[in-house]
Image: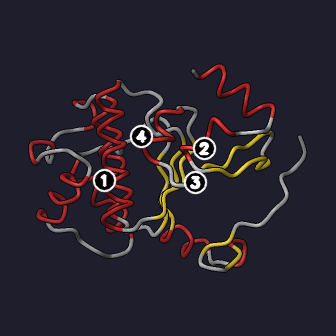
Amino acid sequence: MGTPKGTVFLDGTDICDLDVLCLRRKVGMLFQLPVLFEGTVADNIRYGPKLKGKKLSDNEVYKLLTLADLDSSFFNKSGGELSVGQAQRVALARTLANEPEVLLLDEPTSALDPISTQNIEDVLVKLKKDQKMTIVIVSHSIKQIQRIADIVCLLVDGEIVEIIKPDQLSEAKHPMALRFLQLSS
């Protein structure tokens, strides 16, 4: 497979024309597996804003913990004390502390148990609804897509082959999409 071709726009501007730091401030990323920094949960959440010269108050950290479906008891815990699901929610809170306009998620629940998966999905739905945040999620879970997505882009070899609504997945026409749906049911 060659180099992908195409253009990604953010607010009407080609992202290649944006300053890298500006782009990083507008777009947050959450990966498959959480990676936390040394220190406490609060230290992790304060990391990004601190780089920009902003100090988050304890109250702001508590609000972000709550948003990520974690209670105040996590504030002084170290990353090593957390389950993968809890660490993923801390990573989400840390990403949200930077106040991104867009959230990119790469299989954010693939390593999680069903309860942690549901907790993360609930947070994402809440962010979409309450904060009108744009969320782009890569997922192989049909159930997750149907719970979270407004629009589904089916990709084959890095190319969008179909754009449909989640409740129309069964109407997909591309052979690879049909095969994926068949194997997922």
Left of 25 or right of it: where is 161?
right
Q: Is residue 70 above or below residue 8?
A: above
Query: Which residue has dot 3 on it?
Result: 151
Q: Position of residue 134 (x, y in %)?
A: 48, 63
The residue indicated by pointer 4 is 35
Between residues 126 and 16, which one lies in front from this camera angle? 126
Q: Residue at x 50, y 43 (%)?
A: 31
Of labels 4 and 3, earlier in sequence is 4
Decide: few, some or many residues near mark 1? Use Cα within 10 Å; few <14, some 14-19, many ≥20: many
Q: Amino acid at mark 2?
A: Gln
What type is the residue that disc 3 sits on? Answer: Ile
Residue in front for this viewpoint, 181 or 22:
181
Q: Residue 10: horizontal and vertical position, in percent?
A: 61, 73
C-beta proximity under 8 Å, tags 1 and 2: no
Q: Is the C-beta separation of discs 2 and 3 under 8 Å?
A: no
User: Which quarter shows the C terminus?
Assistant: top right
- How far is mark 4 from mark 3, CA to CA? 29 Å
Q: CA distance from mark 1 to mark 2?
A: 32 Å
Callout in the foreground (2, 4) = 2
Q: Secondary structure at mark 1?
A: helix
Hey, which quadrant is residue 62 in on the image?
Answer: bottom left
The amino acid pointed to by label 1 is Ala
Specify the amino acid type for callout 4: Val
Mark 2: which secondary structure?
Answer: helix
How much space separates mark 4 and mark 1, taking CA atoms? 12 Å
List the residue tagged with mark 1: 93
Circle 4 crowding by C-alpha within 10 Å: few under 14, some 14–19, many from 20: some
Which residue is under mark 2? Answer: 168
Nearer the viewer's eye, disc 4 or disc 3?
Answer: 3
